[in-house]
Image (cartoon, rainbow, N blue to C red):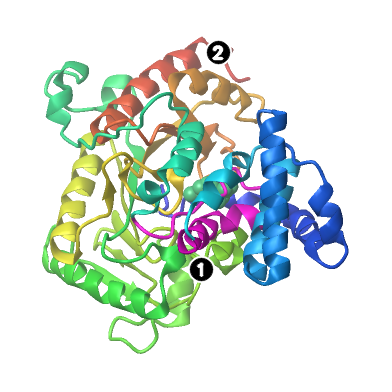
Amino acid sequence: MFHAVSNGLRHARSHARGVILGGGALIAGSAIAQAAVKPVAQSDGSSVQGMLSEITGRLARVEAALGVADYETFKLLDLIKSARATHTDNLMAKYFDFNYYYSLPTDLQKRLLKCCQSGAENADSGMGVYAMNPDDYDMFKPYMDVVIRAYHKIEGEVKHVTNWDLSTKADKLPAGGKLDLTKLGLGPTSMRVRVGRNLKDFPLPGAMSKEDRLKMEQQMLVAFKKLIADPAYGGQYYSLTPGIPESISDETYKKLVKDHLMFKDMAADTYLTSAGISSAWPFGRGCYVSADREFIVWVGEEDHLRIMCMKKGTVLNDVFDRLKGACDVVEKNSGVFAHSPSYGYVTSCPTNLGTGMRASLHLQLPNLTADGTETKAKAVCKPLGLSVRGAGGEHTPIGSDGTVDISPSARLMIEEADIIVALFEGIKLLLSEEKKAPARK
Ligand code: CIR
């Protein structure tokens, strides 16, 4: 059965960090002078860009020496340069535009650098950016847009359209509008849909104070009380905040984590910690769990809210529709979700922008995984726009029976309704590839 915990790429790579913190140490003492004359690697290799970057770097050092730029700023800029040279996959560093940065007033320079801090301090980041305020993506659009388009592989203007209405996809749906997995030959299947959401009236988690966190949790309780009173949901809110009526014991928290209903202390995640997202733990953290345990809302993880619906069943519409209904209850009672005219729902991490949605199901692919790895399944899934994970989430091994977790890869510039259709259509094609593959012995 599905569990709620499904954290991203980020948990697997903290080991490489020391290298970069070592690189950052270059700024100490006489190494500053060496760093100042070192040529800077440029993504386009152009010498004019290189010279400009060199000049801006030197200017930063002069400013630092004169005491008009602070040490923290200087250190972060230096780390970004090191990361760019050593980790070409780090999108934050790859596209950091020093000319754009220096064109901003000082307060905005600081704001932008805060968004880049995680990727600067963790050079092995694949993304490296976390927004700190709901309007950061639009405020820093000249830079953010480049990073977002690179990650989401979007050419041209990003203009996300939000649309949950499956009836607008009638031409792509089977007669009756139901995405029924039994029609694909599947029995009861673990299905899960989650979205990341943030309330527009609060800073994003990386910039939240303890007071912000406490206030937001209280605001969320208004929606949770509505859900608890509704027989379709019922259940309970479990808070990690000490001293409130909803507070739980450490023992209960551990049990919720063990049951995969609640997230772990994020302090172990260096990417989130560098971004400030793990700060003030455990204040303002908690989770709402419905009576049937098939609907969960995390409060205070990477996004203000991770709202998820899971079920072992055969009709994809069931989890999709329930999630939409519950999102509406939350938004009506606890505050409007942050939404950008270009980027759709605003999430801390640019990788989740747009729908913030991940819709997945567990599928047995014994033939495509006959060698015990997901390599072949991944190769088949990629052109179908599907991602493959182990059934326990990202970076978990595939089941011995060949069970994998399949989801459409796109989050941005795709409508919510299209994600669900893409999952159904993708599974159909994948199952026919599974049939064609040599049978597992
Ligand atoms: C990175 O840049 O690699 C980390 N900040 C994680 C990026 C993937 N996003 C995620 O897990 N939400």
User: Can you give x and y, in whole percent of width and height, for residue 351 in the image?
Assistant: 46, 42
Q: Which residues are magenta?
A: 106-134
The quadrant where residue 402 appears: top right
Q: Nearer the viewer, residue 105 or 415?
A: 105
Q: In the shown orientation, is residue 261 left or right of residue 38? A: left
Does residue 268 sit above or below 54 in this rendering? Answer: below
Residues at marks 1 and 2, CA–CA distance in whole angstroms: 45 Å
Label 1 Cα neighbours within 10 Å, binned few <14 / some 14-19 / many ≥20: many
Q: Does the segment drawn in magenta span residue 209?
A: no
Amino acid at dot 2: Ala
Task: Please state which of the two labelled residues, at mark 1 or mark 2, is closer to the viewer.
Answer: 1
Q: Nearer the viewer, residue 347 or 68?
A: 68
Label 2 Cα neighbours within 10 Å, binned few <14 / some 14-19 / many ≥20: some
Give the residue drawn at x 85%, y 68%: 29
Q: Nearer the viewer, residue 309 or 122?
A: 122
Does residue 440 sit above or below 108 in this rendering? Answer: above
Q: In the shown orientation, is residue 120 left or right of residue 323? A: right
Amino acid at dot 1: Ser
User: Can you give x and y, in whole percent of width and height, for residue 1 in the image?
Assistant: 41, 47
Per the image, label 2 sits on a secondary structure element best described as: loop
Give the residue drawn at x 58%, y 57%: 118
Mark 2 CB in 8 Å range of ligand 1? no
Decide if residue 51 is in sight here. yes
Decide if residue 404 is in sight here. no
The quadrant where residue 233 appears: bottom left
